[in-house]
């Protein structure tokens, strides 16, 4: 079973040199898959039992720390204008 695409890609067929549009969920043939170097274009395979999942867009997010609060934004500074100097 081949790998499935997570996003649409445009690739040039290696022998015919024609442009091919592949849709999300497609499982392209090996010669076309070799033309897609971006690892983000592919669906992630499920990790084996016991392997941790990734953090970020493809995995789960860590739980926020309830004791840590967001710092308030720094106050904005005013700039002097040319009129104020006169």
Image (spheres, helix red, strand yellow):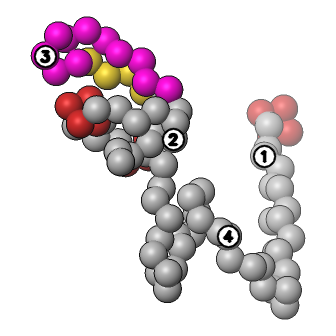
Q: Which residues are magenta?
A: 13-23
Say which residue label 1 marks: 79
What secondary structure is found at the residue carrying circle 3? loop
Would residue 47 be found to the left or right of residue 38 on screen?
right
Q: Quadrant of residue 22?
A: top left
10 Å crowding of disc 1: few (<14), some (14-19), many (20+): few
Residue 18 visible in this rendered orientation of the protein: yes
Q: Secondary structure at mark 2?
A: loop
Outermost front residue: 1
Q: Residue at x 84, y 32 (%)?
A: 83
Q: Residue under label 4, please give it.
A: 61
Identify the mark nearer the N-term, 1 or 2: 2
Q: Which mark is residue 6?
A: 2
Q: Position of residue 40 (x, y in %)?
A: 44, 46
Q: CA distance from mark 4 to mark 3?
A: 43 Å
Find residue 17 and report its horizontal and vertical position in percent.
Answer: 19, 11
Q: Position of residue 29 (x, y in %)?
A: 28, 32
């Amino acid at each position: 079973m081949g790998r499935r695409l997570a996003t649409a890609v445009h690739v040039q067929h290696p022998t015919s040199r024609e442009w091919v549009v592949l849709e999300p969920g497609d499982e392209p043939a090996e010669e076309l898959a070799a033309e897609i170097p971006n690892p983000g274009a592919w669906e992630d395979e499920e990790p084996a039992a016991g392997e941790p999942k990734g953090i970020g867009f493809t995995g789960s997010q860590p739980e926020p720390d309830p004791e840590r609060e967001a710092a308030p934004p720094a106050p904005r500074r005013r700039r002097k204008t040319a009129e104020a100097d006169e």
